[in-house]
Amino acid sequence: MTSGKIRETALRHFAKNGYEGASLADISAEVGIKKQSIYAHYKGKDDLFLAVFSEVAAKELQFVEAYLKQSGGMSPDKLLLGFLLGYKERYEQRDDTKFFLRMAFFPPGHLQREIVEYGNQYLDQLELLLMPIFAAAARSGQIHPDVSIERAAAAFTAVMDGMFVEMLYGGLERSMKRLDASWFIFWRGIQNIKEGHT
């Protein structure tokens, strides 16, 4: 119970103040324990930070799984664009998603290797979850036969990364402009447009 409360409180502090600005003293005070008691659960600040990050990364994958499950009857283009728009809303509303994306792109220097490893695991799992969507679209002739499902999934995550970077750097309005342009080019590039149609 206490370990979970520590992670929950630490998430708010890391999300608001970053790694450097968050202190174990402040976290323990909010939890209602002494700072030394944190060490009964975590080796230190690094260990706590990585525990929070890995838990949040797992929650982000749960969001992906839940979205794909509930959107199963949609056409691939609507499902995928809806996923990107849903992630934008999630970023606007949730501290854990903000924390995950900020730290994935801007990790503390001394923890970069570990965070990049978690981030790559997330992307690998995301692509695996997306493969059936692209495979179904390929079987139904919606994706051009020259585009492999692996390449389509990798290109989609690149579109998603572009949206994330713009949300972090340029704000939501600029991210929507980038998403609109990159989505149009992405989908037009992979779809199987019949000759004589645009």
Image (spheres, grey):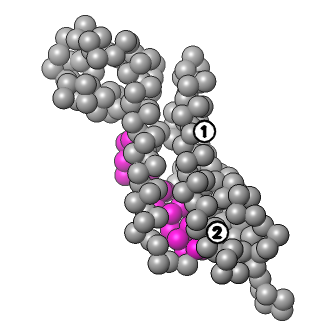
Alpha carbon distance from label 2 to label 1: 22 Å
Q: Nearer the viewer, residue 182 or 173?
A: 182
Amino acid type at circle 1 is Asn
Specify whether residue 123 is painted magenta.
Answer: no
Mark 1 surroundings: few (<14), some (14-19) or many (≥20) residues within 10 A: few
For the stretch drawn in magenta, the main secondary structure is helix
Could you tell me which quadrant the C terminus lies in? Answer: bottom right
> What x and y, as percent, mark residue 96?
39, 41
Instruction: Name the disc covering residue 120, or none.
Output: 1
The residue wearing badge 2 is: 135
Is residue 98 something that shows in the picture? Answer: yes
The one of 78 and 65 positioned closer to us in this rendering = 65
Instruction: Write the start and end of the magenta stretch as one range.
Output: 76-96
Residue 159 visible at all: no
Which numbered dot is residue 55? none
Q: Regarding mark 1 in the picture, which secondary structure is present there?
A: helix
Where's residue 80, x and y in %?
Answer: 56, 67
